[in-house]
Image: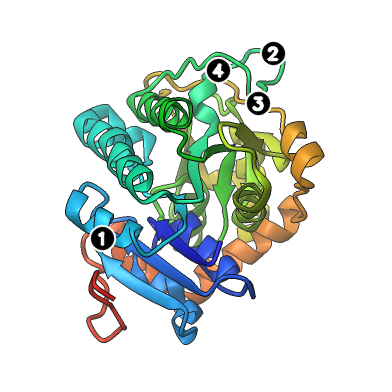
């Protein structure tokens, strides 16, 4: 695992992973490939640029020539790049299919040609669809409800097929809802935090009874690293183990963390295909790879809210115009032909 290519490494989860993996003694170089769309910001990488190991390439995973050039220089890939916002997928499904499915295939084709030693494809628990009871293991059928989840399920299957058909050493991770610093304010936790910090109201869908598991991004990244280092090719690993909360319970935590009251909350009609409950069994990763989440919800939410409180320059422009905050040209950006 000497040379690691991280797609989507300027995004929320990807940037946390880059900062983690770049500290490893057995990693000689890390290349981030990111298109810097509205949810990817080079500033997210921050202190990673202090390391001579890091190269940043501004480009798209759909660019087959660029991907092929980069893949030739790396022996491990961690693939985070994706269109990921559920609501956006309702009116832009084609973009989700293009990036999440065809983009993944473009990477896999290049990985096959160049004989990469490890390929980790990051996915989501939403591919299992709603569970009214019980918990989804990695063997469960995929029953996605919305275009975003369907595009991720399709990309999972494409990735796994490249192991079965061509021997590309693919592992798939499926994590529950991540939260933490640097997340785009379209997601519920930073959306609520930033609105509450500005004294604005927040809204809950339906009656706030939808259940999600909340996993700190650092715990997810620890799981992804464990899969990168020790996962068996062709296997899927669920990464959960945070805290199960209804929307109303999550809101209560955020109100308390931000010093607000229920007067700030209003209820709105539920969105289409809003799955009532997700639940995944992460015992496989725990047993086989030693995966163990460490962050408590209280500490994680406090840390997250504090980051948004201290960094309004990073998120305030995004609440007005998602395209307003573009990467400063003065930061070090390398071309593909490093």
What kind of element bears circle 4? loop
Q: Residues within 10 Å of mark 4 (few under 14, many from 20)?
A: many
Asked where in the image residue 217 lies, by quadrant, the reply is bottom right
Give me the C-alpha separation between circle 1 and circle 2.
47 Å
Q: Is residue 316 above or below residue 144?
A: below
Q: Is residue 34 left or right of residue 222?
A: left
The mark that comes first in sequence, 1 or 3, is 1
The quadrant of the image that shows the N terminus is: bottom right
Q: Which residue is mark 1?
A: 69
What kind of element bears circle 3? loop
Q: Which residue is mark 3?
A: 279
Q: Which residue is mark 2?
A: 133
Q: Residue at x 73, y 60 (%)?
A: 299
Q: Which residue is mark 4?
A: 130
Give me the C-alpha separation between circle 3 and circle 4.
8 Å
The quadrant of the image that shows the C terminus is: bottom left
The mark that comes first in sequence, 4 or 1, is 1
Asked where in the image residue 88 lies, by quadrant, the reply is top left
């Amino acid at each position: 695992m000497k040379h690691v290519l991280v797609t989507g490494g300027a995004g929320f989860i990807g940037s946390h992973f880059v900062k983690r993996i770049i500290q490893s003694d057995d990693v000689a170089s890390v290349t981030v490939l990111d298109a810097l769309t509205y949810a990817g910001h080079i500033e997210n990488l921050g202190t990673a640029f202090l390391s001579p190991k890091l190269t940043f390439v501004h480009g798209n995973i759909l660019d087959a020539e660029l991907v092929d050039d980069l893949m030739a220089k790396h022996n491990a890939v961690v693939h985070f790049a994706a269109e990921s916002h559920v609501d956006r997928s309702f009116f832009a499904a084609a973009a989700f299919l293009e990036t999440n499915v065809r983009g993944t295939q473009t990477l896999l084709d290049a990985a096959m040609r160049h004989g990469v030693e490890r390929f980790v494809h990051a996915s989501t628990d939403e591919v299992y669809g709603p569970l009214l009871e019980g918990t989804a293991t990695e063997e469960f059928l995929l029953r996605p409800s919305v275009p975003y989840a369907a595009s991720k399920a399709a990309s999972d299957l494409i990735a796994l097929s490249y192991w079965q058909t061509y021997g590309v050493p693919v592992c798939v991770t499926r994590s529950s809802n991540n939260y933490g610093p640097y997340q785009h304010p379209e997601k519920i936790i930073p959306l609520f935090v930033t609105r509450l910090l500005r004294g604005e109201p927040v809204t809950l869908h339906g009656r706030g009874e939808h259940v999600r598991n909340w996993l700190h991004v650092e715990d997810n990244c620890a799981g992804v690293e464990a899969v990168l280092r020790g996962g068996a090719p062709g296997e899927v690993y669920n990464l959960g183990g945070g805290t199960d909360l209804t929307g109303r319970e999550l809101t209560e935590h955020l109100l308390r963390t931000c010093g607000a009251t229920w007067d700030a909350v209003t209820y709105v009609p539920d969105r289409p295909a809003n799955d009532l409950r997700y639940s995944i069994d992460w015992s496989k990763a725990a047993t086989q790879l030693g995966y163990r989440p460490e962050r408590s919800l209280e500490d994680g939410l406090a840390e997250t809210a504090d980051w948004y409180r201290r960094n309004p320059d990073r998120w305030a422009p995004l609440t007005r115009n998602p395209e307003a905050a573009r990467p400063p040209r003065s930061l070090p950006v390398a071309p593909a032909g490093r």
